[in-house]
Amino acid sequence: MKAVKARITKGIPVGSRIAACDNSGARMVKIFTVFGHKTTKRRRQAAGVGDKVMGSVIKGRPDIRKTVVLAVIVRQKKEYRRPNGMRIKFEDNALVVLKDDKGNPKGTLFKGPIAKEAAERWPAISKLAKVVV
């Protein structure tokens, strides 16, 4: 996992329900922790594009529902700034469910674009992505 060059605004707080944009069987995931996130006391953790999160599946196939999964945020509505001055935002918030801790995705097909920051940080996701913005 590489460092992200852009200054990502953390726009997805803990407790958010986010749609999965892959064919892993999960449709909606509720985030309950963000990996590697440091905050002040009593401040809620938040995630941005490229962050690894842990969540529980609340909608999806019956065999994957009510399970804890690792995931990576690949799109967010809140705009963030790239080093060249460009500001990026997407229509929706989306994540990709991971198979293991190394970053291999569980699904084989992604719907919609994937942010460049997430693709650079997670090479296994960028291999399967059709559109990288």
Image (cartoon, rainbow, N blue to C red):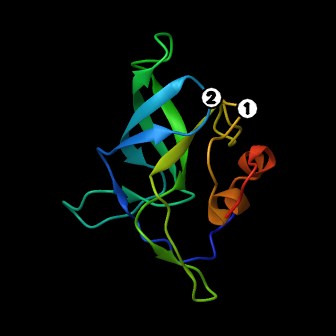
Which residue does the image show at 64% across and 88% down from the upper left? 84
The answer to whether residue 1 shows anywhere in this view is: no
Q: Quadrant of residue 24?
A: top right
Which residue does the image show at 64% across and 68% down from the upper left? 3
Real-space Cα distance between discs 2 and 1? 7 Å
Q: Quadrant of residue 11?
A: bottom left
The percent coordinates of residue 64 (x first, y second) are 50, 17
The secondary structure type at the circle numbered 2 is loop
Disc assigned to residue 85: none
Mark 1: give few (<14), some (14-19) or many (20+) Cα within 10 Å: few
The residue indicated by pointer 1 is 108
**Left or right relative to 118: residue 46:** left
The answer to whether residue 128 shows anywhere in this view is: yes
- Quadrant, the N terminus: bottom right
Q: Residue most toward the right?
A: 127
Which residue does the image show at 43% across and 71% down from the upper left? 9
The residue indicated by pointer 2 is 23
Whether tag 2 and tag 1 are in contact, CB under 8 A, the answer is yes
